[in-house]
Amino acid sequence: MTRVRPVSIAAVAALAALVGVLAYGLARQHGARSLDQALQEGRRPAPPALRLPRLGAAGERALGDWRGHVVVVNFWASWCTPCREETPLLARWQRRLAGRGGTVVGVDVLDVDSDALGFARKFGVAYPLLRDRDGSAARRFGVIGYPETVVLDRRGRVAAVARGPVDDGFRRRQIEPLLQERA
Amino acid sequence: MKRRLMLVALVLAAWSPAVADACPRTTVADLEDEVMCPVCGTSLGLAREAPLAQRERALIARLVDRCQSKRQIKAALVAQFGPAALALPPDRGFDGSAYVMPLAGGLAALAAAVLLLGRWRRRAPGDEPPSPPRIGDADRRRLEAELDRLR
């Protein structure tokens, strides 16, 4: 019988470890787009966990705090040019949603606090704002550009995703039907 | 009263140059290669046009104007953007492998070299490759005769 040399075993183990590390790194980077995949298959997946500090205020909020509401989670940044056009629309949506069991929640990503607060004041943002300082929460939702929006139904499941700015057509098609659903 | 005023003036005169020397304590250019533009994936120095890089540069400039040191500004950037704001990866979690892997690779290469060297030195005389067969006197004479014939 052929004797396996210790050097060969060590080399194979080292190679396996290297491949494992690379695979884990790749999986960590690209796993989050599974939300889109699930939606394409007609499923409503559970969202990744999200608990973040409030922007410009003390304390934290989690997505579970709005359970029973239709939640429009908008990932934005003050340095993002398309966000300047989208934010006034979201501010209007908030006025429409607030009385119907819905809310917009803004997640400010990779931003300077003072710039973000100035931006929110400028555009009259009245919906809750959270702060994702290092973009880790956004990555878990598969966000790779700004703005992007994820809509949760009243049971807290992901019901729609917009990879780019939203418009009123998105609200009519994706959000209005969810407001009719019961928790 | 006059003496007190003179004393205050003297103290201020002595203190002002010290402050002038100490502030600013760093520059934007000095920090640009040591911090990252978090969305660009490059150091801030390489990210000239990215909107976030410009905001980050403006933030650093404001902190420089407030006489903050390089260390304080880096801490402020980490508070804003997380540890990824630093050009060097954090030494914890998965990112810590950036420090461990080169060391582990070096150690593995060293161990392999030591193993191979040991095996080479321990090689038994019987393992030596066979030397080419010697030519006898008769064969040599015959070879030379053949070569003479060809010349």
Image (tube, rainbow, N blue to C red):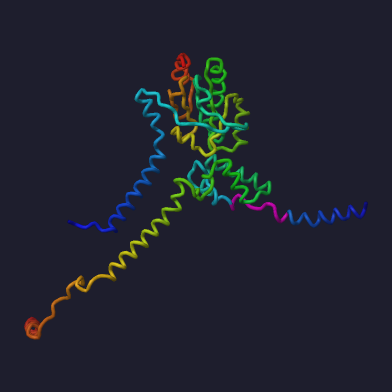
* Quadrant for the N terminus of chain A in the image: bottom left
The residue lying toward the viewer, choosing from B132 and B106, is B106
Would you identify the image quadrant in which residue B10 lies?
A: bottom right
Q: Position of residue B50 (x, y in %)?
A: 52, 41
Q: Is residue B28 visible?
A: yes
The residue lying toward the viewer, choosing from B111 and A74, is B111
Tell me which residue sits at (10%, 83%) in the image.
B136
The residue lying toward the viewer, choosing from A58 and A121, is A58
Q: How many marks?
A: 0
Would you identify the image quadrant in which residue A178 lies?
A: top left
Outermost residue on the right side: it is B1
Q: Is residue A169 visible?
A: no
Q: Position of residue A49 (x, y in %)?
A: 47, 31
The residue lying toward the viewer, choosing from B129 and B148, is B129
Tell me which residue sits at (41%, 34%) in the image.
A32
Residue B122 shown in magenta: no
Q: Is residue B3 left or right of residue B108?
A: right
Q: Which residues are magenta?
A: B20-30
Tell me which residue sits at (27%, 70%) in the image.
B122
Q: Is residue B146 left or right of residue A161?
A: left
Q: Position of residue B43 (x, y in %)?
A: 51, 48
Residue B25 shown in magenta: yes
Taking A31 as reference, is A104 above or below it? above
Q: Is residue B140 left or right of residue A46?
A: left
Q: Position of residue B78 (x, y in %)?
A: 57, 44
